[in-house]
Image: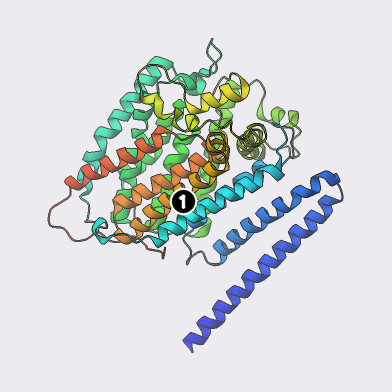
Amino acid sequence: MIRVMVTQSANKQKISLISLCLLGSAILGIGITIISQTIEASTLRLLPWYSITGLVIFFILTAIILFYRRLDLLSPWILYPLVYLTYYLIGSLNISTYRREVDVGMLFPVVYLGLLGFLGGVLLAKIIPISRKVVRPSKKLYLPGVWNAIIPFYLIGLLSLVLILLKNGIPLLGGVTRSGILLRATVSPTLESFARLIWISAAIYVIMVYSQTHSFDKKSILLMIVTPLLLLPLGYRGYIVIFAVVVLIALFHIRRPTLLILFSILGLITIASYLIWIVRYSVEGSLDISTLARFYHFPINNSFLFYLYSIMREDISLTSDILSSVAHGSFLGGRLFIADLLTILPGKQQSGPMMMAQMLHGSGVAGLTVSIVGGLYFDFGTTGVAIGLLVIGFLCMTFYRRMLLSRSVTSMVLYSIIMTESLHYLHRGVFSVNYIWDVLVALCICKVIEFKRMPNVEDAPSFKRTPS
């Protein structure tokens, strides 16, 4: 009897999924038909890419809503493709005069090639077996030892932040220097890297406390409030967003929240990012956001929606420029990829985003982000896009599987950081030395914490595992 009820419930879910997919397809079909009556015939060839991408996103979201408890929304094979396709779909919409028109017919074949590369990397990681020798069950953590371990790293980051403020002033409010460069772009890369210890150590403490108690103590609550406030003067919303997403991914795999709570948290992260952008643009820009949206003929008079559109549009527009202007054989051959790595050398080195600004615009007050497809294509062409995203998919899935198999808080921290940095790389388009730095520092902090464990303790309570 119970088996029959379960079967009927499963059938109802399948029917609901098929119905919603058909409904979504019908709506998209009607919308495409209406749009096709109002646009020029020369642009009709672009519509299949929009409809295909919209359908894929719709299928993923439908599956998430219907099978939320069965699917791991924040696993590599769901989270990355969803963000990746949404990013390129919204950024490619030619609904305003902001940046130049995107050649969708040229863009999306390369975008889907990259997606196939990523999914190929995920599949490859699932096929390759993980040796049990590298999967060690986690021991219960000695929480006072965790706090004592992260404090030195947090203080080093705080000292670096103070040195930045003493040397450069407040980058968030600094505007443009006399030489025409944004103040936040003149910060020492070394000091900036050490300042990242603030969010790395704070995230590790919050994750480890929650993994042991399924709650937050006073110190973790204090860190979640103070850390974003300390990072705010640097002027980059990325630090705060990365900190929040790293913690969210880890906490999701410890104790899964309801879908409403999850989307509420993501909404708060987006709003916080928007507010930072408002403050920063009011200092660096010459127009207020509403005036800017009207100036670029954005169809909706809403500064928040224009913000969501513009952060994607800028990257995708530059990617389209790269695809259309870089002739075969004129690729950079890796110079852009290693540009940020060279900033660790003595002397003044040009970062990857500043190199992009120099090459695309001749100059710039700040660096440019070109999305991962644009950056990899500029360096290595379509082959680089496919192989680069294959490597990212392989790394994300490998660390995800290790997290599920080991029940280790350390592996959870590492996966959360690698997954978050991969999403940041999707936007930035230029590989950053800080991606390696963040993982190495997090691993170092976790190893220090292991030495401070209470002796002779039982295994730690495992976090909720989802089939890989």
Outermost residue on the left side: it is: 456
Instruction: Point out residue 36 in the picture as x, y percentages from the top left corner.
Output: 83, 51
Residue at horizontal 46%, vertical 51%? Answer: 393
Q: Secondary structure at mark 1?
A: helix
In the foreground, 462 or 40: 40
Picture quadrant where residue 200 is located: top left
Q: Is residue 347 visible?
A: yes
Q: Quadrant of the C terminus?
A: bottom left
Count of labels in the image: 1
Instruction: Point out residue 12 in the picture as x, y percentages from the top left corner.
Output: 60, 77
For residue 13, side relative to residue 228 (left or right): right
Q: Is residue 245 visible?
A: no
Above or below 260: residue 330: above
Outermost residue on the bottom side: it is: 1
In the foreground, 157 or 438: 438
Q: Amino acid at mark 1?
A: Gly
Residue at horizontal 37%, vertical 37%? Answer: 436
Instruction: Point out residue 74 in the picture as x, y percentages from the top left corner.
Output: 47, 55
Residue at horizontal 67%, vertical 70%? Answer: 19
In the foreground, 65 or 370: 370
Above or below 77: residue 384: above
Above or below 420: residue 192: above
For residue 139, side relative to residue 82 (left or right): left
For residue 284, side relative to residue 96 (left or right): left
Pointer 1 local density, CA inside 10 Å: few below 14, some 14–19, many at least 20: many
Tell me the residue that label 1 is attached to: 393
Picture quadrant where residue 309 is located: top right
Instruction: Point out residue 244 in the picture as x, y percentages from the top left corner.
Output: 44, 43
